[in-house]
Amino acid sequence: MSRSAHRPPADLPAPAVPRAALVVLAALAVLVTAADTYVVVLALPDVLTGVGVGLDELQRATPIIGGFLLGYTATLPLLGRLADLRGRVPVLVGCLLLFALGSLLTATATDLGPAVLGRGLQGVGAGGLVPATLALVADRWPPERRALPLGVVGAVQELGAVLGPLAGAAVLAVADWRAIFWLNLLLGLALALGVLVTGRARRPDAVGLVLAVVAATALGLRLAEPPALAEDVTLGLLYVPVAGVTPLGWVAVLAAAALVARSLQHPAGAVLPLRGLPGLARELDLVGSALVVVALGTLVWAFAAADPATEVVAHGGVLLPVAAAAAVAFVLWERRTPDPVLPLAALRPVGAWGALLVNLLVGVALVAALVDVPLFARSLGGADQLGAALVLVRLLVAVPVGAVLGGLLCRVVAARGVAAGGAALTAVALAAMTRWDAQALDGVGSTVVLAATGLGFGLAIAPVNAVLLAATPPAVHGSAGALSVVARTVGMLVGLALLTAVALRRFTAEVGRLGSPFELCPQTPTDCAVYERGTDAAVLTQLHTVFAGAAVAAGLAAVAALVLLRAPRVRG
């Protein structure tokens, strides 16, 4: 165990004294960033056009999506550790500011590079909010009362999947895609200010806040170049370079430099917590942090950049060996360093590593539902893109309901029983999907199955996180929360790649048995009903294979939850 394994976080209040306002703001931040993940999928064609990428070059969209996912996952252990060392509030504020900066870069991007960088920064900011918020809840509620607030946080996070596409559609109905990111910028800054004011024992330095606002405003105006300013005869001088930098650029640089100086000279209430950075660098285990970023980053990119139709992983001959070597080096280093970035010794209790395993398996099942339910609606149900999204909503709306219900049930039922029951319900519902035919979505039965699937996923959220946090000491709750998110994300990536690869192989085999349209319908090969029916049957086989694999993963999650989720008195 590291020297700091039992050291309380910097902003840990007195036990069992919840500060509802701060937790609510943190949960709202999680909601905003979770919604952003799904907004971009809807606006992606417009984003590509806006940064100079034609719709015939959709393969170049991979970095925009992968950049967010890479930033979201690879830096999670580092941010979780930061939340343990320097407190939850500074990490929440820093992540919101990174999210806002990424939104600014994306909103003003005219080329692919700045858009990818902006999305990467948004991913880093969004990822760090989740473990810091989970740790914040654990700090303010004792283990026996923790499950319900954890369920609420999980519900808010999952609600982003429902609200994100709706919010994106609403914005796109009245403005262009850049308005989405301008809105994200405003929300990120407002929430950062709210968390800063609410979460600090002392009021933030007023001079520092003014300098921060001046620097951010100047940078935003410089990047955005609104025509009303840039084309004005007088105000346009702000965009004329002086010594290679525009006046707005000089204002941003000088205000930022003054903010740094002010924060160092007046640490009490400083906007930037810069005092103690050398000591933080020593505690943070920079070598271990670099190794885990490389290991997770290469693993994420290998799966995220793969084309499921042709490969399980992209550049597997290079990225997977690098990921494996970095992972081995990381474990060896962490065993030797006194202050590891991931306190592996704290994960020795069965409940701790068992919760991570359950989350991994839940991720495998979850991604299959998220991807293949709308695919079923479009391929066999005859729905358009909007119709397919509405079918998926039947599942998604039940997830936050299940998350809150799971937290409530933990008051009267052992956490492992609630988690196992939720995963088992999902397994049964996914197994029912393997019997769907082309008309399955027409009846009310499909709605029941979809709702049961989402409800089961939601039921597992609160008890799994409650056991994980109860089985680990408070000083590592940030790291534990980060690993919880990493486990689910890796499960989703690996599950999508493997299940899709197996399903596509079955599809190819089924189509191969059909023969060509020229063989089946030599007179009318371009209008061969036999071939079309056979192809539809092959697509159905492909989707049934994915649903079956997801049902197995959910079933294994139920067994693992029942056997492994052991923690003392996790009721809430």
Image (cartoon, helix red, strand yellow):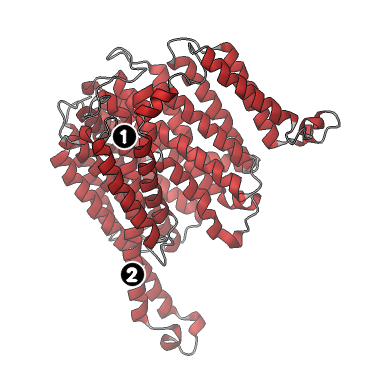
Secondary structure type for disc 1: helix
Could you say which disc has been placed on residue 505 in the image? 2
> What residue is at 41 percent from the left and 67 percent from the top?
310
Picture coordinates of residue 532, whole percent (x, y): 43, 75
Of 127 and 554, nearer the camera is: 127
Picture coordinates of residue 255, whole percent (x, y): 64, 22
Secondary structure type for disc 2: helix
Picture coordinates of residue 362, whole percent (x, y): 28, 46
Residue 264 visible in rendering: yes
Question: Relative to residue 350, is residue 383 drawn left or right?
Answer: right
Q: Earlier in the sequence, mark 1 or mark 2?
A: 1
In the picture of the structure, the residue carrying the numbered disc 1 is: 403
Question: Relative to residue 12, is residue 414 drawn left or right?
Answer: left
> What residue is at 47 percent from the left and 25 percent from the top?
93
Q: Bin the neighbour count of mark 1 within 10 Å (Cα to Cα): few under 14, some 14-19, many 20 and up.
A: many
Could you say which disc has been placed on residue 421 in the image? none
Question: Relative to residue 351, is residue 195 drawn left or right?
Answer: right
Question: Relative to residue 304, is residue 272 drawn left or right?
Answer: right
Which residue reaches farthest bottom?
A: 523
At label 1, which amino acid type do we have?
Answer: Ala
> What residue is at 42 percent from the left and 52 percent from the top?
301
